[in-house]
Amino acid sequence: MYQKISSALISVFYKDGLEPILKTLQANQVQIFTTGGTQKFIEDLGYSCTSVESITQYPSILGGRVKTLHPKVFGGILGRRNLDSDLQEMEAYQIPKIDLVIVDLYPFEETLASTNDEKSIIEKIDIGGPSMIRAAAKNFQDVAVLASKQDYHLLNQLLEQQQGALTLNQRKSFAAKAFEIVMHYDIAIADYFNRQKKDLRYGENPHQNAHFIGNLDKIFNQIHGKEISYNNLVDIDAAYQLLKEFHTTQHAFFAIIKHTNVCGAAIRETGIDAWKAALQGDTESAFGGILLTNGTVDEEMAQSMNELFFEVLIANDFSPKALEILKQKKNRILLVNQQDYSSSSQMKSILNGMLVQENDSQNEKEWKEVGGRNTTEIEKKDLIFANRIAKHLKSNAIAIVKNEQLIGKGCGQTSRIDALKQAIEKANSFEFDLHHSVIASDAFFPFDDCVKIAHQNQITAFIQPGGSVRDQDSIQYCQDNQLAMVLTGVRHFKH
């Protein structure tokens, strides 16, 4: 059932893309309430609007910190249209109904990325914006809310098609998006206040000054070792992201990270067997690496690990005997994983700004068998394992797995065929038998050459996202040669 919009409150930081909505609202005779800079923008375009100040009888005060925090604004948003007592109070206090709220948030994260000036950062903590958004989203039964310029086009399209009206489901959908936006905003602010600035010895290289801004203590408890360096932190982050892939694995998972790439990984019944299998995958690269496991390090594991030089070991716990052994090297960093700290996004500073994206949290979006035969149960386990490992190798990436053990990998190559050749060469150099092993590729095979080379080396099953215009070439080769191939529909580039 459609509900006509009669009034809208618009107060936005980002005004680009707003004009088509204003045109549609005017065409549908919607009264517009607005504030400050948005009012000037609307009036300069030739549209009529009413200032919030004329409703509240209060000017914008405290340098703009207080503009909309008033019962006549929030009463107009929160008033329930099906409740007589609410309607009577709104009439008694001359509170206008507000049917649509278009409000975005001050650019807190953008400001954080561009300056270290605390005063500037604090002033970009929005108060009225989140409050109005939450109020409108809470009252989605009667009020529509738009909290991001990304949805300007969608809203305008709906209003044009539906003569200035929205359905309950549409209002509820906008409300869900609004709550997500406010949640992300609040988390970013909380993270800022929880951060601690810590000077590091140096950056990637000795001539580079560096510091860490964050709160590592929330994630790890360092129980031994030297001060964590810049490069340690980069590798620890890569290790932690990998560990999250396998934290619910029933059996013991062990992996070794070197320069943010996985160089050894395995799942086994016991921790000692998982450690040995992971090390076996690449005994050379493991030197000076980062070790991680989803379980407890016991005495037997510690004795075996103690023979290898490594920088960091991350575990859920350490037995007393294991600590005795591992603490013999005073600089060895031992970290206890304290909690599953999961951020919904990733940030990277670049040029004069920051890139923000959602986590690559999906593994197998869909499992589509397209080869000459279906995967066996053993192959399926190995393909899932290989696909998750490939996610954590620099692109172009290939992971070769057999019996839930990484036996060869190619990463950071400029072509997929080079990555495959590197992975096969690595496996052969450690004398692994490739017969009945499987391959994961972080992106599609552009041609069938990779599948042919792998088959020539006795590899019998493949997992890849698909998406090439020539997917059928690789699929046909697998069908002609009774090889298994799975398409997931999800690419895992890691630059």
Image: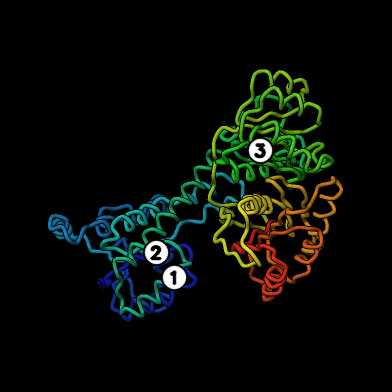
Instruction: Please state which amino acid type lies under the numbered disc 1.
Output: Tyr
Q: Which residue is mark 3?
A: 268
Residue 357: horizontal and vertical position, in percent?
58, 57
Residue 51 visible in the snapshot: no
Q: Is residue 61 above or below residue 467?
A: above
Alpha carbon distance from label 1 to label 2: 8 Å
Figure quadrant of residue 414: bottom right
Q: Quadrant of the N terminus?
A: bottom left
Looking at the image, is mark 3 or mark 1 nearer the viewer?
3
Mark drawn on residue 146? 2
Decide which of 50, 390 is in the foreground and name it.
390
Q: Which residue is mark 1?
A: 152
Q: Is residue 438 above or below residue 51?
A: above
Query: Dot 3: what SS?
Result: strand
Instruction: Please state which amino acid type lies under the numbered disc 2.
Output: Leu
Query: Dot 2: what SS?
Result: strand
